[in-house]
Amino acid sequence: MKRILTTLAVVAAALGGLAASAHADTLDTVKQRGQLICGSNTGLPGFGIPDDKGNWTGLDVDFCRAVAVAIFNDPTKVKFVPLNAKDRFTALQAGEVDVLARNGTWTLTRESTLALLFAGPNYYDGQGFLVRKKLNVSSALELNGASICVQQGTTTELNLADYFRAHNMKFEPVVFTEMTEVIKAYDSGRCDALTDDSSGLAAYRLKMTNPDEHVLLPEIISKEPLAPAVRQGDDKWFNIIRWVGYAMIQAEEFGITSQNVDDMMKSDNPDIKRFLGLDGDLGKSLGLNNDWAYQIVKKVGNYGEVFEKNLGDGTPLKLKRGLNQLWTKGGLQYAPPLR
């Protein structure tokens, strides 16, 4: 089996390499098309979901809008393509999307065997469990012998197996390809627990027939740095994707918001002047207009604004910043120097 897996990995890497070489000038392709194509979630509140009129919202959605602003100075020049967990990486490898912003976990093997590169995490998450209150359990360690709904072909499925093996516990996996099927199965009582990223579980709970009947268990059993991904072989495009995310974080660290960015243009701070394109050639070095960061903040917002709009206390999810707070406030969100 190991030999077969190794062979598949080599083939996947070769296919990824071919795909990368066939799309080595993604920025030029996007500009000529006049539109960014963003691989998105099929419908995850807070991260990527369309309404009944086809208007997309979410943290990942706003990231793609920020990329569109950096390239076109227009947040509407982006097409969202919903992708399930099984097809998301294949679609990116095949060039069907320019960037994948779909709460995907950054892992070693996804870069080493799938020929992908992940930009900096735009959300630090971890895997948890959702159960019915009437099950009367207060810890995942009480789930020995439980049936657990999980999405097939994800790191979530692997983490689940590792966690139970490590604690010498047994479980019955109930797997589905589509997350909608997983949620439906749990809500109908086909399994005792539902496992996924904790942010996703908070969103899925809202979809249950009776949301108040369910509770998140306290254990976080994995590290899930969720990050946008691109194909390998196009460093220029990777740099744009990576630094768009960092620019949104840096803007929050500078205290630059969509509301005060015009006033901040009058700042004498050399770092802020450079960031907003008043000094230096940061934008030009990426192949963008020099005011790219100014336009992102003005038309999409800084990282904190986008977080609060999609996930924060003013939303049904009411997620705390936690690990996604700035490093200066005890979190992990940190942008390398923009200079």
Image (cartoon, grey):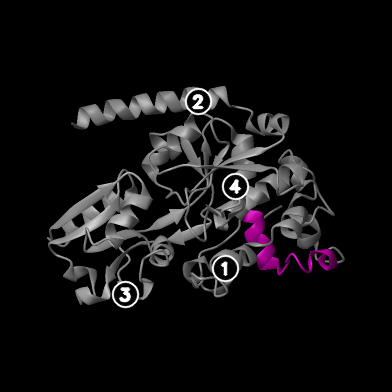
Q: Residues within 10 Å of mark 3 (few under 14, many from 20)?
A: few
Residue at which label 4 appears: 242
The amino acid pointed to by label 1 is Leu
Q: Are marks 2 and 4 in contact (CB under 8 Å)?
A: no
Separation of marks 3 and 4 at Cα, in angstroms: 40 Å
The amino acid pointed to by label 3 is Glu
Q: Nearer the viewer, mark 1 or mark 2?
A: 2
At mark 1, the secondary structure is: loop
In front of the other: 230 or 197: 197
Separation of marks 2 and 4 at Cα, in angstroms: 20 Å
At mark 4, the secondary structure is: helix
Question: The magenta stretch spans which residues?
Answer: 246-264
The amino acid pointed to by label 4 is Arg
Q: Which mark is residue 213?
A: 3
Q: Position of residue 176 (x, y in %)?
A: 29, 46
Q: Position of residue 195 (x, y in %)?
A: 30, 59
Q: Earlier in the sequence, mark 1 or mark 3?
A: 3
Is residue 213 part of the magenta span, yes or no?
A: no
Separation of marks 1 and 2 at Cα, in angstroms: 36 Å
User: Is residue 53 rendered to the left or right of residue 155?
Assistant: right
Q: Earlier in the sequence, mark 2 or mark 4?
A: 2
Separation of marks 4 and 1 at Cα, in angstroms: 17 Å
User: Is residue 309 rendered to the left or right of residue 105?
Assistant: right
Residue at which label 1 appears: 326
Q: Earlier in the sequence, mark 3 or mark 4?
A: 3
Residue at which label 2 appears: 19
In front of the other: 222 or 104: 104
